[in-house]
Amino acid sequence: MTMHLASIYARARGEQPSPELEQLLASALAEARRRWPFVHVTDEAFAAYAAERVQGDRVAWTDLYLACAAASGDPAALRAFEEGIMPHVRRSLARSIEAWTLDDALQIARRDLLAL
């Protein structure tokens, strides 16, 4: 088994690649591509993006894939992000902040979620 994805990911984190990491990343990519078939991210771009952002063991790989594509400007990913993710963010924020600050808070959330 080649460890192309694991090598990119591990190198960016100062770690050693492993067959288990390669399998995890390959499975994550396959699942994300099934979930978002119209979104396009290269294996290399996803591995590098994930390496910079993953913390801990609980990772929403399909959402991370969408964020990676959206952050790179993929129009289909940006549309999916706005239609699929941001309504949840809006509802959550609307429960905890004043209505007049909601639009600004959503812009900050977009920036932070996509790391723009």
Image (tube, grey):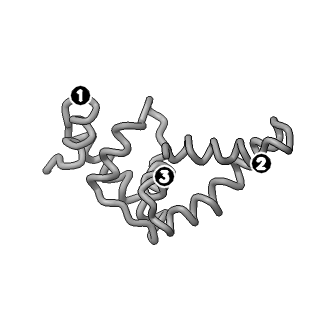
Question: Which label's residue is closer to the chain start, 2 or 3?
Answer: 3
Residue 58 relative to residue 79: left or right:
left
Which label sits on residue 5?
none
- At which x and y percent is residue 31? 42, 58
User: What type is the residue that disc 1 sits on?
Assistant: Gly
Q: Cα distance, mark 3 to mark 1?
A: 23 Å
Question: Dot 3 lies on which element?
Answer: helix
Residue pointed to by mark 3:
67
Residue at the limit of the structure toward the right, as seen here: 99
Q: Tell me whether circle 2 and circle 3 mark residues in contact (CB < 8 Å).
A: no
**Residue at left 23%, top 29%?**
15
Q: Residues within 10 Å of mark 2 (few under 14, many from 20)?
A: few
- At which x and y percent is residue 79? 57, 66
Vertical placement of residue 62 versus 50, above or below: below
Vertical placement of residue 40 versus 66, above or below: below
Q: Cα distance, mark 1 to mark 2?
A: 38 Å
Which label sits on residue 91?
2
**Residue at left 18%, top 49%?**
4
Question: Which label's residue is closer to the chain start, 3 or 1?
Answer: 1
Residue 33 relative to residue 98: left or right:
left
Question: Dot 2 lies on which element?
Answer: helix
Residue pointed to by mark 1:
14
Q: Residues within 10 Å of mark 1 (few under 14, many from 20)?
A: few
Foreground: 76 or 21?
A: 76
**Residue at left 36%, top 59%?**
30
**Residue at left 36%, top 55%?**
29
- At which x and y percent is residue 114? 51, 47
User: What type is the residue that disc 3 sits on?
Assistant: Ala
Foreground: 49 or 21?
A: 49
User: What type is the residue that disc 2 sits on?
Assistant: Arg
